[in-house]
């Protein structure tokens, strides 16, 4: 089902009466956002808002959703921290993921909907996307071709195996987020929470 379809999503939430929700749906990738920006708006903003609305109106206990390290944008502080300024996304994809975090935070604040956002760095494993770095490197090695290296090799990248992501997501879904007044000074309801 298309998460950007408001009526279908409302019906799904009403029928299923979920206790917890994990949203891993998104239009991913930076390059495609240059060709089809509205696909990102439809999925990552409209679709995510429909899911949050379903959670709000059906008393979901906790929603966990996938964000992206793309939200760090032009930040040059390494290693990244959840406390870093993320006001400078450098792609539409990153802008939609940051917007999703802000929307989730607002739903938490306004409607006491516990939300947790997870920023997945490069995930690899079976069925990975063929345009991702591990796949490109593995293909070049198999074909005995040179590996393209940029920035004179002066860069670092984290890779996370899919099984580790799955384990983390399963653990987080039952750890309902609570408010953190460090980020939300007006939080008075202990059930209020938000995305990191």
Image (cartoon, rainbow, N blue to C red):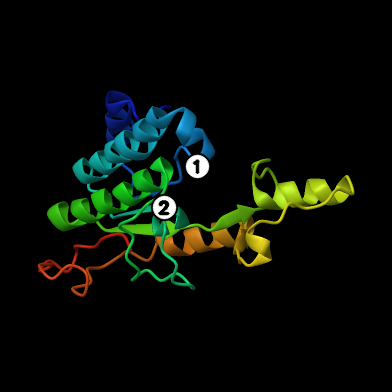
| Above or below 137: residue 12 | above
The mark nearer the N terminus, 1 or 2, is 1
Q: Position of residue 18 (x, y in %)?
A: 34, 44
| Residue drawn at point x = 47 percent, y = 64 percent | 171
Q: Residues within 10 Å of mark 2 (few under 14, many from 20)?
A: many
Residue 3 visible in the current orientation: no
Q: Position of residue 61 (x, y in %)?
A: 28, 55
Q: Mark 1 and mark 2: span between their CA atoms?
A: 14 Å
| Above or below 196: residue 96 | above
| Residue drawn at point x = 49 percent, y = 59 percent | 170
The residue carrying mark 2 is: 67
| Residue drawn at point x = 22 percent, y = 48 percent | 59
| Above or below 186: residue 113 | above
Question: Helix, strand or loop at disc 2?
Answer: strand
Closer to us: 51 or 26: 26
Indicate which disc residue 30 carries.
1
| The C terminus - image quarter | bottom left
Q: Residues within 10 Å of mark 1 (few under 14, many from 20)?
A: some
Q: Is residue 19 left or right of residue 108?
A: right
Q: Is residue 186 left or right of residue 147?
A: left
| Residue drawn at point x = 35 percent, y = 69 percent | 84
Residue 16 placement: quadrant = top left
Closer to us: 143 or 15: 143
Residue 18 visible in the current orientation: yes
């Amino acid at each position: 089902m298309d998460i950007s379809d408001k009526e279908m999503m409302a019906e799904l939430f009403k029928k299923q009466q979920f206790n917890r929700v994990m949203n891993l749906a998104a239009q991913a990738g930076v390059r495609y956002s240059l060709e089809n920006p509205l696909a990102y708006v439809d999925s990552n903003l409209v679709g995510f808002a429909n899911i949050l609305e379903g959670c709000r109106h059906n008393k979901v206990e906790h929603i966990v959703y996938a964000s992206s390290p793309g939200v760090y944008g032009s930040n040059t502080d390494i290693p990244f921290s959840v406390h870093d300024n993320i006001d400078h996304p450098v792609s539409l994809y990153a802008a939609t993921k940051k917007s999703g975090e802000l929307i989730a935070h607002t739903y938490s604040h306004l409607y006491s909907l516990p939300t947790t956002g997870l920023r997945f760095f490069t995930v690899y494993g079976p069925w990975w996307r063929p345009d991702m770095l591990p796949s490109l490197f593995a293909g070049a090695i198999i074909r005995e071709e040179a590996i393209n290296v940029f920035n004179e090799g002066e860069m670092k990248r984290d890779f996370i195996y899919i099984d580790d992501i799955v384990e983390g997501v399963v653990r987080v879904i039952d750890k309902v987020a609570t408010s953190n007044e460090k980020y939300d000074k007006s939080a008075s309801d202990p059930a209020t929470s938000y995305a990191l």
